Image: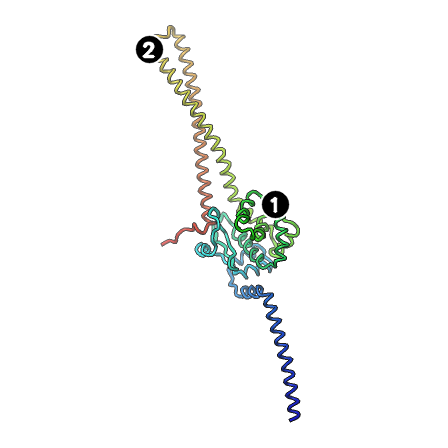
Amino acid sequence: MKLSYLSSQKLSHGGSWLSTIVSVLILLSVGWLGFNYQYVVDQVAVWSYHSDPQLDRIINDTKLTTRGEFYLKASNAQIANADTFSKQCKKTENHSAILGCYVNNRIYVYDITDERLDGIKEVTTVHEMLHAAWDRLGSQRQQELTKLLEAEYQKLKTAELEERMAYYYRNEPTEIANELHSILPTEISELSPELESYYSGYTDDRAGIVSLYDKYSAVFDSIQDEADTLSAQASALASSIDTNTKSYNADMASLNSEIQNFNSRASSGYFSTPSHFNTARAGLVSRTDSLESRRKALQADIDKYNSMVQRLNELSTKSNELQSSIDSTLAAPPSL
């Protein structure tokens, strides 16, 4: 019985230590999970991620790093059709289309198929992935980056970028740094060394991503630039046509009156000699020829103006087509 008692005591003592160790391990695990909850959720999402050929190609083409690919897959990134995209990504401004969104820890990229806009899905995907990355940064790191991003914005901002950011300054001031965090690296070719170093953690080819952005943006810019130039020229030409038409009509009315007067005088025997008659007639013929030249020049200007208007209509149609191709709310209805 004594041996049995001693043995029992040893067993009980060992069990107590084991229980303590297990408890400590559980507490440590709970603590670790508390501090790394998002990582665990992300890792599970990555393990559960179903491969998408389009996204796999985008990951390859944009040369995302392991971290960039991880955040993309952790956000269950999806290339979405118009119906799905419109339901998940709500427009905040009626005059602009949205190409992607990061909502409820998920990334949606609109499936734009217009070949003239090659690269737009790639840039949008990286843009949204960087929103997911920002969401996972600690507050101290966000504050550090906010200073760098705002300084870079003040240094590099354009009128167009100011107009885009004005929405966030008006309506979502807390999202300014978050938005700059996605816009600057995907659209601006040169950033500060600190930001270049930071973004190298997400892609090995930031320059290539910006090049894609420049390529598809140039499609819109070229249309807008040509339309602006043509519109200004057409407006100036229309003003000139209006002025010249009024002058032409006044001079034509005056000439018609003088021709009627000449014919009346000729019929009444006003002209005493053939020379007198021919001199008066020659003056009217010269003025008629001059007016005819002016009429032809005016008609040429009118034809040119009409050609400009036609080209402007073509550019408008082209612009509308492109806008429709990137606006999920304007997708064509299903065929019956």
Hey, what amino acid is under mark 1? Leu
Q: What x and y, as percent, mark residue 6?
A: 66, 89
Toward the bottom, the furthest residue is 1
Against 30, residue 242 (above or below) is above
Q: What x and y, as percent, mark residue 108?
A: 50, 56
**At 35% across and 10% down in the image, what residue appears?**
266
Against 162, residue 142 (above or below) is below
Dot 1 crowding, Cα within 10 Å, few <14, some 14–19, many 20+: few
Hey, what amino acid is under mark 2? Ser
Q: Which residue is mark 1?
A: 156
Q: What x and y, as percent, mark residue 228?
A: 50, 37
Quarter where residue 143 is shown: bottom right
For marks 1 and 2, the one nearer the N-term is: 1
Label 2 sits on a secondary structure element that is helix
Q: What x and y, as percent, mark residue 281?
A: 40, 13
Q: Quadrant of the N terminus?
A: bottom right
Dot 2 crowding, Cα within 10 Å, few <14, some 14–19, many 20+: few
Residue 53 can be seen, yes or no: no
Residue 207 versus residue 233: which sits nearer the camera?
233
**At 41% across and 51% down in the image, what residue appears?**
332
Real-space Cα separation, disc 1 to disc 2, in angstroms: 80 Å
Toward the top, the furthest residue is 272
Left or right: 14 in relation to 170: right
Q: Which residue is mark 2?
A: 267
Residue 174 can be seen, yes or no: yes
Label 1 sits on a secondary structure element that is helix
